[in-house]
Structures are given as C-alpha cells and as structure tokens.
Image: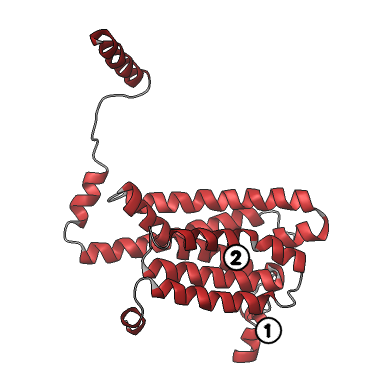
Amino acid sequence: MFLLKRFSHYRYPMALLIAFQHLFVLLAIAPYDRKDWLLENVLTVACIVVLALTARKFPLSRISYTLIFIFLCMHQIGSHYTYAMVPYDTWFSFIFGESLNSIMGWSRNHFDRLAHFSYGLLLAYPIRELFHRVAHVRGFWGYFLPLDITMSTSMLYELIEWAAAEVVGGELGAAYLGTQRDIWDAHKDMGLASLGALLAMLVTAAINAYLQRDFAREFSESIRVKDNRPLGENAIRRMWRKKKAGGDKR
C-alpha cells in the first residue's frame, strides 16, 4: 500500500522499468553464454518496447506491471546463467546448509520448470486484464480465455524454441532449448505453464467471488446461450439474403 500511495499510476511502471534496466545491465555482464543470452533476450526487448509504447494510451494496473516485472526478472536470471545452469541449489545450500535437489530427489536443474510455471502464474492475470478491458469478456470467459491464451502461447514458445534451435544448431541450439536430455521437456513445460495459469485464475475467481456481489449472476449469464440460431451455412444464407435485399432496394 505504501508503494501505491507513493507512486502515481504512471510513475510506478517507470520505477519498475528503471529497476529492471539496472538488473538487465548487471546480468548482461559476462553471461555464461553470450550468444544464448542474446537469443533469450530478443522477446524480452520486444516485450519492454510494447509495454513502453502502450503505457500512456493503455496503461495496465500496477498489479499487472508488477507481475510482468517479476517474471522478466526471473527470465534475466535464466538468460544470464542459461536456464540449465542457474545455481539455485548452491544458493539454497548456502542459506539453509542443505541441497534442495537432494531434499526433493531431483537429478536435473529445475529452474526452467519454475520459469514456465511462473509464466502461467504471473502472466495470466495481465492477459485477463487485457481481455477484460478490450473485449469486455465477463464471467466464465474472463477466466477461461486467459488460461487458454497462456496454454497456446506456451505451445507457441516451444515451437519458437525448436525452430530457433534448428536454425542456430550446435551447442547454442541445445543451450537455448535446455531440455537436459528429457524427451518430454516441452510437454512438462507447457503443463506447468497451464497449471500456473489455472492457479492464478482460481485465486482471481475466489477473490472476485468474495468481493463481487453479482459474481454468480455474471458467471451464469456468460455461459447462457444468447442466440439459439445455428451459424455456418445458416448464417451465410441470412447474410446473403440481407445483402441481396439491400441491393434490390437500390
């Protein structure tokens, strides 16, 4: 609450941008693999540019900006070390004196799994805000569509990773994919992103159900059939007749 009072709606994202720029520059210094770092940050730079260009005409909520900021910070850590080499286990051992991988029985580096789960958990809400404000989606669709978009973009990102790895090839392609010899890596990544988005939407729905008086009515109204007439060839026939009738009048 202190931050919300201290920063105006336009100053808050600027403060986050400045903080992210500092982290970006810091983690750009001597990354584990410079080529992989460049490849990983193509979409990051594109995201920052889009957010900066739309900040005035279409400002997001401070919650959405914060969630995006946290995810991009995690991505910078992954791109600095490469996702398969992030030394989270070393950090955990330094703080708690015991290996997290040993406790959990893990044999691989799971930072990439955390990043994909966080993609759904942190970005589903900003996607919901976009749908809510642009398309005016309500009720069930306000929770399903962000989940659906998160799942589809997660799949799209896996295809982009595969295509980029095929183009660059060699060790760079392998580092960018980060499968760590797991043939089901892409499926698990998409599953975790979907799980994160589902959790985010369930929490959002629970908060809205508690605070929104007409939550149940809006939810039921959103899944009620608004037009019982079939579309497809029936809709084409109706439009054709309407167009022909308009032409005859002229």
Residue 216 visible in image: yes
Image coordinates of residue 92 in percent, x first then y, are 62, 85
Residue 128 figure quarter? bottom left
Residue 106 figure quarter? bottom right
Quarter of the figure with the N terminus: bottom left
Q: Classify mark 2: helix, strand or loop.
A: helix
Left or right: residue 219 compared with residue 181 = left
Left or right: residue 194 compared with residue 240 = right
Residue farthest toward the left in the current orientation of the protein: 213
In this picture, is 91 found above or below 182? below
Q: How many marks?
A: 2
Crowd tier of the residue under label 2, counting other residues whose Cα lies within 10 Å: few below 14, some 14–19, many 20 or above: some
Numbered badge on residue 113: 2
Image coordinates of residue 142 in percent, x first then y, are 33, 52
Q: Residue at x 65, y 87 (%)?
A: 93
Residue 110 visible in image: no
